[in-house]
């Protein structure tokens, strides 16, 4: 069942401008030509989905397939196929899950770490050139605010997911969701 949007809220002009800026950033960063240029400069032949997966693993490795899918907001089957391709290419490997011997986690190989390092280096160099007129304080503040915004987005998404699971459990059980009113 689809999650219902929250009740209509008045959106401040500042929030509307942030949304517009984020849309522009998303568009600019997702252009195929931009990705191809980045991969050529980094010398890494990966598609956008593979790069997103490698970045996620690099930021928090090692993870189970389901955890990776959840963090990327995609179906587990997509991650499974992508991991298989990355494993064949030598960028990732499967390692035993120390918490559950039956499960496996996905970890970067040396080649995977090198690839993501080169991609990040080229990406950062491009940002450095684009933002060269910014003061160090402005750059620090922007980084701080971006991290804060992303953390708030993640917390909001997690709360919405928990709310949706509660609604589904209530509908499946025909009654109150677990932890309901006494």
Image (cartoon, rainbow, N blue to C red):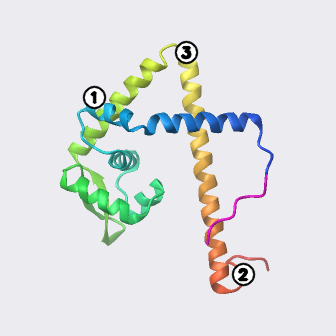
Which residue is most to the bottom?
174
The percent position of residue 174, horizontal first and vertical second, equals 69, 86
Give the distance between the C-alpha atoms of the residues marked 2 and 1, in whole angstroms: 56 Å
Q: Residue 129 colored magenta?
A: no
Q: Is residue 160 left or right of residue 67?
A: right
Magenta range: 1-8
The foreground one among 178 and 168 is 168
Give the distance between the C-alpha atoms of the residues marked 3 and 1, in whole angstroms: 27 Å
Q: Describe the element under mark 3 as helix, strand or loop.
A: loop
Between discs 3 and 1, the one toward the N terminus: 1
Q: Is residue 10 left or right of residue 157?
A: right
Which residue is painted at 26% across and 32% down in the image?
Answer: 40
Q: Which residue is mark 3?
A: 135
Which residue is painted at 29% across and 35% down in the image?
Answer: 39
Q: Is residue 103 left or right of residue 135?
A: left
Circle 1 crowding by C-alpha within 10 Å: few under 14, some 14–19, many from 20: some
Q: Describe the element under mark 2 as helix, strand or loop.
A: loop
Q: For the C terminus, which image quadrant?
A: bottom right
Q: Measured along the vertical axis of the image, is residue 160 above or below residue 19? A: below
Q: Which residue is mark 1?
A: 41
The percent position of residue 178, horizontal first and vertical second, equals 67, 78
Q: Residue 3 colored magenta?
A: yes
Give the distance between the C-alpha atoms of the residues marked 3 and 2, in whole angstroms: 54 Å
Which residue is painted at 27% across and 42% down in the image?
Answer: 113
Between discs 2 and 1, the one toward the N terminus: 1
Circle 2 crowding by C-alpha within 10 Å: few under 14, some 14–19, many from 20: some
Is any part of residue 160 visible from this angle? yes
Please tell me how many numbered marks the rendered image carries. 3
Q: Which residue is mark 2?
A: 176
- As drawn, the label of residue 84 is none
Q: Measured along the vertical axis of the image, is residue 66 above or below residue 112? A: below
Instruction: Place residue 170 in its image quadrant.
Output: bottom right
């Amino acid at each position: 069942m689809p999650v219902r949007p929250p009740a209509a809220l008045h959106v401040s002009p500042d929030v509307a401008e942030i949304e517009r800026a984020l849309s522009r950033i998303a568009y600019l960063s997702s252009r195929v030509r931009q990705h191809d240029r980045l991969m050529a400069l980094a010398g890494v032949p990966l598609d956008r989905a593979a790069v997103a997966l490698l970045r996620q693993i690099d930021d928090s490795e090692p993870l189970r397939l389901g955890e990776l899918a959840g963090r990327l907001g995609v179906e587990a089957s997509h991650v499974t196929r992508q991991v298989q391709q990355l494993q064949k290419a030598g960028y990732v490997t499967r390692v035993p899950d120390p918490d559950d011997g039956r499960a496996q986690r996905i970890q970067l190989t040396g080649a995977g770490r090198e690839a993501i390092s080169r991609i990040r280096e080229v990406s950062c160099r491009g940002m450095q050139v684009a933002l060269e007129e910014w003061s160090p304080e402005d750059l620090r503040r922007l980084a701080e605010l971006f991290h804060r915004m992303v953390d708030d987005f993640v917390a909001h998404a997690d709360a919405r997911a928990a709310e949706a699971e509660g609604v589904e459990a209530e509908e499946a059980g025909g009654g109150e969701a677990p932890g309901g009113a006494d």
